[in-house]
Amino acid sequence: MELLVFKPEKTTVKELSKELDVSSRTVHRDLKGVEHILNQFGMRLDKKAGAGIKLIGETERKDKLQRYLLNISHNEYTQEERQMVILSSLLSTSEPIKLLSLANELDVTIATISNDLNKIEEQLHAFGLTLLRKRGYGVEIVGDESAKRKFMSKNINDNLNEFELISLIKDSMQTKITDANAIDNINNRLLGFVDKHKLFLIEKEINAIKDDLPYDIADSSYIGLIIHLALAIERIQQGEEITFDIDELNNLKQFKEFEVAQKMATALESALHIQVSQGELGYITMHLMGAKIRNDYEDFLEDSTLNIGVSIQHLIRIISEKLDYDLTNHASLFQGLVAHFKPAIHRIKQNMDISNPLLSKIKEEYDDLFHIIEEGISEAFPNLDVPEEEVGYLVMHFASALLNQHVSNEYKALVVCSSGIGTSKILSTRLEHEIPGLKTENISLFELDRIENYAYDIIVSTVPLKDFSEKYTLVSPLLSKMDLKQVLSSLMNEKSMVHKKAEYKGKENQVNGKSFLLQLEKMILYGVIIMDIMKGFKLFHLQKEMQLEDTLRDVCERLQEQGNVSDADKVFQSLLKREKMGALGIPGTTMALYHTRNNDVNVPSFHMITLLNPITVKAMDGSTIALETILLMLSPTEASEATLEVLSAISSLMIRDEKSIQTFQSGSEEAIYQYLVHELRTFFELKTNINIEES
């Protein structure tokens, strides 16, 4: 910039490279950064092949830029910051960089740079990357493109918290460089991996398409996806392509996430004028599959969910035994673990980067529980290498279950968290545990601008809330003693609470009236679904020996006669198709769950079939079982969320504990019916907050 701003005439890349003692490629690369800074001053470069380069702008703007350049002072970096700058330089180019160039940029000796590279080399090894250093050649990072991106992503996540990234995404169009510190700030060097304006465009396109997914995306995963795409686009534009196993890619094409990934790619290709390869599509699909947010009730009719549920229930039994505290009947814990672990298993198997910024605090606060769960996971999932980061999230679920207790609803708190994976749940549970009478509700940072503050007595956040006008209390997700004192102090501020309640009295009455109608609607909805399923429940006892396929066809035909299905053959074929996708036997039992969602199913239903003689079939874990009882669960394709919740609740009962398994295997229609009624009543009370007395 100095050479260009102080030279009124045009100059060439060759002349610049000679004067700076670097290669022409280095000059071309650095000119991109120069143009970015010039844009902030309302100036630009006139570049014409063969004619040279000239800075274009008004005299007043040139004078301002000259003053700015003359006043730039060198930053004193820490060793860690210096290494981050070196890494950003190495990862931002596909060609070697001279040690002298790095030393000059950081104003240190070549020996210091060499020592820094030794430290960097240790970090790279963990990702399967190496540092190539040759005298006269320079230094460069060598390795698989996917590993480089994973390394970049981890460095961004480790050094910038989610709130900073969310703020960056939201404010990216307004971001301006105003001083030297902004240019050399270490965070901005990290974000040099990606273009801020591209972040904005990517977020806009993802936000427009993410509703096509059959589930919500957790904030942390949403940010991770944006960073992944931003890195991918930068690397694509640098000519770096990612490779992907063709068989794995073909396997991914059957999932809804691949279709959504294609839509995202098409939108980004149009907005950014790039070409997204099939390999890139594969990686986008994997991110989407690993991004599912935890819901209160996971859809057990989804493929593989019950299989995971079996292992999770095994894990809960193991932890219960180790703690000498029974958690096997804790429905919320079971559902939360299944919903969290399903995408987690995908992330682990695909070797995707998993970040848990609270890991050190979790290990400090729950050291014994952490080791118990770590041991339990190795027993329940012997073929899965679960990293400490994921163990930390599971500890949060168990800690919440152990802390959970009944509280009255005198006060209401809004809990704001940057992540949708465990942090908000454990904070809410601890708040309710420590403050009797407190009821919490969770939202993410992305929802913050849509809240109605009058509905809450206190707002508690785990991250600073930028430009947020309402009063809030900042706490750690693990709620230290000092944090608790702050929350109690805010709640005891009677003056502000009285003022708040008086000011919004009319609105609160409106909310309460609306809440009553919503509660009534929910009660009727769940009541009707449970009534339909229980009235239609039937245990079929086969009187003659039949092939498995003939048995399923026969039952489908009976259900058509009863009006449960409109086309028995289509439902039967759908069941066979599901069977071919994977084993349905429940490990350690004599049962198999056959299930499908089909347009020809008229009403959701649950039935059981006892076979005359056992049949050997494959179980979900690869073993074999002697099948004696078929569990048949049917749902319309466009079933409501409430319907899927009820069916999921029934599915989870099949594998809850030894008692429930024995009940389903008993062959007694009356015993199974009474067990289902009892459990569904508990489910109904939980969903509607209505207690039903037994007659």
Image (cartoon, grey):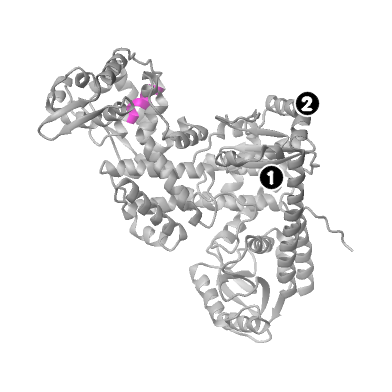
Query: Which is more toward the observer, 307 or 51?
Result: 51
Picture coordinates of residue 674 (x, y %)?
79, 68
Query: Which is more toward the observer, 225 or 121?
Result: 225
Magenta span: 81-88
Mark 1 vs mark 2: give the one in front: 2
Q: Is residue 84 magenta?
A: yes
Query: Which is more toward the observer, 235 or 135?
Result: 235
Picture layout, residue 444 above or below residue 614? above
Name the disc covering residue 495, or none.
Answer: 2
Query: Which is more toward the observer, 163 or 228?
Result: 163
Task: Classify mark 1: helix, strand or loop.
Answer: helix
Q: Could you tell me which residue is drawn at 19 percent across and 31 percent down?
A: 46
Quadrant location of residue 156? top left
Residue type indicated by callout 1: Lys
The answer to whether 657 appears left or right of 30 in the picture is right
Predominant SS along the magenta part: helix
Q: Which residue matches tag 1?
A: 322
**Quarter of the image that includes the N terminus:** top left
| Furthest residue in direction right, as rendered | 695
**Residue 133 in view (yes/no):** no
Picture coordinates of residue 428 (x, y %)?
68, 39
Residue type indicated by callout 2: Lys
Picture layout, residue 499 above or below residue 641? above
Q: Is residue 464 magenta?
A: no
- Label 1 CA crowd tier, 10 Å (few <14, some 14–19, many 20+): some
The answer to whether 492 appears left or right of 268 in the picture is right
Picture coordinates of residue 538 (x, y %)?
72, 76
**Quarter of the image that includes the C terminus:** bottom right
